[in-house]
Image (cartoon, rainbow, N blue to C red):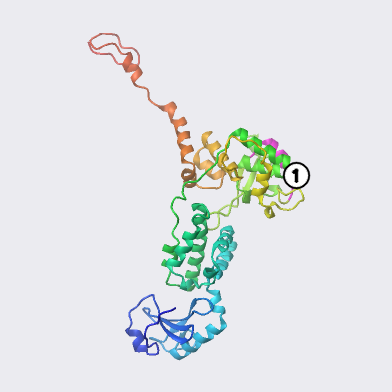
Amino acid sequence: MVQTRRSNLKSRSWRLEQPIRKKPYFETVVYGVLLGYRRTKDNGTWLVRVTRDGDWTKAFGKADDYDDADGTVIIKYGDAHARAKELARGGKPGASGTVAAALDRYQDDLASRGGDMRNVSRARLHLTDKLLRTAVASLTREELKVWRDSLVGKMAPASVNRTITAVRAALNLASEDGHLPNRDAWRYGLQAIGGAGKARNTILTESDVRAIVGAAYRRSNEFGLLVELAAVTGARTSQLLKIQGEDVQAQFKSAGKVQPRIMMPVSRKGRGAKAIARRPVPIPAALADRLTGRTGQLLRRPDGESWEMTNLQRYFDEAIGGVKLSTDAKVTMYALRHTSIVRQLLAGVPIRVVASLHDTSVQMIEQNYSEHIADHADDLARPTLLETMAEVIALPPQGTKTRAKKGVPEVPG
């Protein structure tokens, strides 16, 4: 139930006597409909709050605190009273300010920027019906925190954080559109869950990777190509499915040599538009020859349709079901990416190059593969260690005169 305080919104002088604050002053118009006034530095803001059939709030005009009303932007009390009832009857302004609508708006924004919209779908799946119907301006820190905490245990901490990050981004966008004052509700109510920074990466041996690729080819030649390309390049599935036939450069020459490569589409991860759409990734000549001559989408199902409509992980699980691997851990297609990254790190490829080839950042490489980087650093640093004690021990006892050997100082007698 909304608590209203005794107010006199009709009086301009009363409104101007109130302290400037984000929380509006409300008075009841009719049951379930309240007229609100938010005191600001200049003309205050009129709002309507509807608590029947959901709970939503919408700002709709400026009060005539300092300027005369014009009936459109600056509205006097009587007109604001009538406008609040009109908006409550229509219902549409309230619906446009709900969490569900904020997610729609955010998804459209991502689409316009070429962003990844899968996290929006995940957020919709896990949000409660009540939260989806709630107006963004009415959200509280407590209800958002309760919802966030309800996800813990249902999914991994990293998945919880991806889900709440999408919701937080949608609410921030809605707040920017509507200049809402309650941004702290999701800033604090949707704080990230701790313990999600450590990635549980499954790293496969070379024989494991060969066995998986072989099993994929036994399932179908088309699926084998997809899995082999994932293993060779370490690209995400979303990138692989965007490769076109013309992206394969089997006869590309560099330094006078044929260096086959694929112009790999960049992923939609990260913020904003990326400076380039494709990056060159080297591939073996034999694989390049098998991919040459194709047009349109490079990787397709045996029936010619796109893999995008297939549950690839389930397909992958079925393909490798009878394969004996060296690990008991759950193996996903993403393990091929982890393995590719680690393989290059241990081969001495600079971290910045590894990051570029795998369409990620040095920071993410260091964060998720630090233990493998430490092993790699040990291998690189060991040949440079300075040996000192061997020559010191070989020196004659003190007091013995001897001719100084080349590279060893003469010991005084």
Q: Is residue 337 magenta?
A: no
Q: Is residue 294 magenta?
A: yes
Identify the secondary structure beneath mark 1. loop
380, above or below 310, in the image:
above
Q: Which residue is mark 1?
A: 293
- Mark 1 belongs to which amino acid? Gly
User: Which residue corresponds to the image point at 32% horizontal and 15% vertical from the top-left?
Assistant: 393
Q: Quadrant of residue 127?
A: bottom right
The location of residue 24, given as percent across then percent down, is 40, 79
91, above or below 184, in the image:
below
Residue that extends furthest to the right in the rendered view of this protein: 303
- Left or right of 109 on screen, residue 397: left
Between residues 23 and 276, which one lies in front from this camera angle?
23
For residue 359, say whether it is visible. Answer: yes
Q: Quadrant of the N terminus?
A: bottom left
The location of residue 219, given as percent across then percent down, is 72, 42
Q: Which residues are drawn in magenta?
A: 282-295
Between residues 343 and 196, which one lies in front from this camera angle?
196
For residue 258, say whether it is visible. Answer: no
The location of residue 201, given as percent across then percent down, is 53, 43
What is the crowding at mark 1: few (fewer than 14 residues within 10 Å), some, or many (at least 20)?
few
The location of residue 67, given as percent across then percent down, is 40, 87
243, above or below 260, in the image:
below
- Left or right of 87 on screen, residue 26: left
